[in-house]
Amino acid sequence: MPKPVNVRVTTMDAELEFAIQPNTTGKQLFDQVVKTIGLREIWFFGLQYVDSKNYSTWLKLNKKVLQQDVRKDSPLQFKFRAKFYPEDVAEEIIQDITLRLFYLQVKNAILGDEIYCPPETSVLLASYAVQSKYGDYNREVHTSGFLASDRLLPQRVMDQHKMSKEEWEERITTWYGEHKGMLREDAMMEYLKIAQDLEMYGVNYFDIKNKKGTDLWLGVDALGLNIYEKDDKLTPKIGFPWSEIRNISFNDRKFIIKPIDKKAPDFVFFAPRLRINKRILVLCMGNHELYMRRRKPDTIEVQQMKAQAREEKMAKMQEREKLQKEIAAREQAEKKQQEYEERLRSMQEEMERRQKELTDAQDTIRRLEEQLRELQRSKDMLEQKQNELEVMMHKLAEDKEMEAQERAKLEEEIRTKREEVGRIQDEVNLKDEETRRLQEEVEEARRKQEEATAALMAASTPQHAHVTENEHDENDDLMNGEVGQWQSDSDRLHGSSALYNNYYNGAELANHDESSSIPRPEEDRQTLAEKNERLQEQLKMLSKELADSKDDSKLTKNDLLHQENVKQGRDKYKTLREIRKGNTKRRVDQFENM
């Protein structure tokens, strides 16, 4: 029995390992990968490998894996990547897994500067990337430094601005806070909707020469073929939509494109190597097929996938709304609990204050009792002195005939006694007044004691908020029959491989009648920023914020080209309309004269 061969396939967020047989075809390996990751929109994707000459190449589905020029590593290494890009991500991407794979691939291309992105757009995209990773912004959780380990901006952008990592984080977090309530998948979609308006998004560039030998770039993308000057990958100079192309073929390094318009000459260019022409042919065929398919009604299968995706999105939104209500209810309950705790703290403080007042009142009562005792002693003394005075007066009356000297002495004693009695009377009056005042204080203290006692009783029976939470299990199982449809998807999707077999060095793409009525909605399209005033304002504000810290000496060629395009009022779709002006013949002649 033949020995199995180990294969490692790296997606944008996972590594998969398989054991394949020596006779396993590219299609069988591809189907195994998409089945494993649960992908149904397989028409965008392919398996990429590095060949023995160190060139990156797409695996052919109709050939055996081991018969292709895959570098003989152990295990064999493949990358699962998007090979073709949608024209409009919002209209075409159906599954969340497709969305995630595209998002990660485009984000990596932007961060690696394979797709040029201006600084202000980079910051805005970074804020959506943070939303997709962390969910809603929470000031208590997302504290300073929480983005320290995340790669969010192209190095070029960071080098061009005199800002610290902390300042970049603060700038990104400010915009991240604006996306509160946005689903992670919606944040990825918003990222792609902005990214797809970048000039280099979805373009495969190839070195070519025209008949004059001028070095140029050929750009192959979802909308057609574009020609770029060698020093400018942002602004194409000539464009040919797929609907204008009838046949493509190559002979060695010479590549020939036959237009639908039979009055127009063939569009001929030269590639540096035969293998480049093979890659161009495959990309042209796949992009043309998808271009034509988009302009026809969806197949039943795609309609079913879209219906299922809508249902899943609706269910997810309902689940999110339910979760949001539960979160709101929990927050409300926590808020009430905090209010009750605050009230309890307040009551405890009030209770302590009342307790202190009660203690003070008890001290006052003790002082009053002592005062009353002192008053009673003073009254007793007064009474005693008055009795002594009466005795002396009585004695004086009896001894009228006593000697004058004794009489004078007695009178002096009487006068002294009277003064002492008067003094004691004044003290008693003062103490009576103080006693009345203390009695009033005692009454007030008793009233406060009663209030404090009532407050203590009330505080001993606090109210409580109860939250009822629904608990449920999540069912992550696949629906029956889902897996069984991947085979038919793959058979239908990769029908272009039959064309590739029939025309290994060429392909008939369309006839005149078929192409004459094909709509070109892309020529009426606007960038998201042009349609969305809020996005316009956000980008203008970011541009102003970054202007103060910009170091113009570190601007790259692409930065300068972008600035010139903005100054001239150009964007991706305005340029597209411009480069398709005139008939096919005029544009072919223009290409020949570059």
Image (spheres, rainbow, N blue to C red):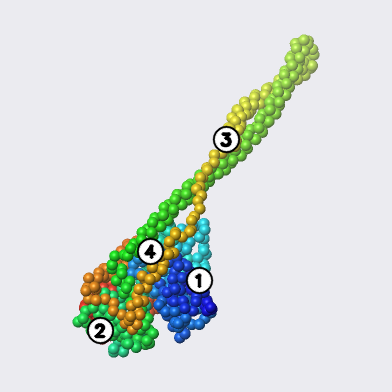
Q: Secondary structure at mark 1?
A: strand
Q: Residues within 10 Å of mark 3 (few under 14, many from 20)?
A: few
Picture residue at 31% right of the left edge, 80% below the top:
507
Residue 266's disc is: 2
Q: Position of residue 34 (x, y in %)?
A: 44, 69
Residue 94's disc is: 4
Kindly indicate whether the residue at mark 4 contacts the one at mark 2 (C-beta within 8 angstroms).
no
Q: Amino acid at mark 1?
A: Leu
The first of marks 4 and 1 along the sequence is: 1
Residue 153 in sight from this viewpoint: no
The first of marks 2 and 4 along the sequence is: 4
Picture residue at 73% right of the left edge, 21% below the top:
380
Kindly indicate whether the residue at mark 1 contacts the one at mark 4 (C-beta within 8 angstroms).
no
The first of marks 3 and 4 along the sequence is: 4
Residue annotated with mark 1: 16
Picture residue at 28% right of the left edge, 72% below the top:
574
Q: Residues within 10 Å of mark 4 (few under 14, many from 20)?
A: some
